[in-house]
Image (cartoon, rainbow, N blue to C red):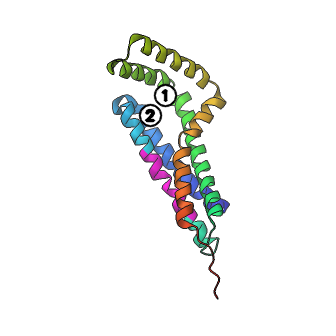
Amino acid sequence: MRKIVLTFGLIAGAMLSAMMLLTIPFMEQIGFDKGMLIGYTTMVLSFMMVYFGVRSYRDNVAGGTVSFGRAFNVGIMITAVASLCYVATWQLVYHKISPDFFEKYSAYTLEKARAGGASDADVAAQAAEMARFNEMYKNPLINMGITFLEPLPVGLLFTLVTAGLLSRKRRTET
């Protein structure tokens, strides 16, 4: 099981990491809204590896049958490996490649709020909230925890759907 989890988790993680490395440096040209769409689309595509990993486990290790619980276990471990790759890549991007990312994102968010008709008080409150978040985000554990939670819901959804689709019980012949 470990080989399957690592193989498919690292493939998914490589997909997530590669797209992050390709898009983050060009986020101002791409646009933050399109960047988010690209990011979540990449997550959906990369977490398809959960399906292929669980299917590989079922067919090659478990003899063609797998319970929902075991399929969920394999899938969530693949998700965890991919998410850890995502976190590691974000740490590289955040600290070395684009250390001013948060400032650029904050400026974009505040400008979007102004363009949307937010009052000066609302914009100031949002700026204060972003400043508090930025200070909190400088703590490496909080940074990594928040980053880990970004792809996790997508991976969890794929894990649940995959476990439901691929779980098979042995039929007893009568």
Tell me which residue sits at (47%, 44%) in the image: 18
Q: Amino acid at mark 2?
A: Ile
| Relative to 34, residue 136 above or below | above
Q: Which residues are magenta?
A: 41-54
| Relative to 137, residue 77 above or below | below
Could you tell me residue 129's position as x and y percent?
52, 18
Q: Amino acid at mark 1?
A: Ser
- The residue under label 1 is 98
- Badge 2 vs badge 1, beta-carbon distance below 8 Å: yes
Q: Quadrant of the C terminus?
A: bottom right
| Relative to 79, residue 172 above or below | below
Could you tell me residue 93's position as x and y percent?
52, 33
Q: Quadrant of the N terminus?
A: bottom right
**Does residue 44 show up magenta in the picture?**
yes
In the structure shown, which secondary structural element does the residue marked by tag 1 occupy?
A: loop
In the structure shown, which secondary structural element does the residue marked by tag 2 occupy?
A: helix
- The residue under label 2 is 24
- Rendering quarter of residue 84: top right
State which tag comes first along the sequence, 2 or 1.
2
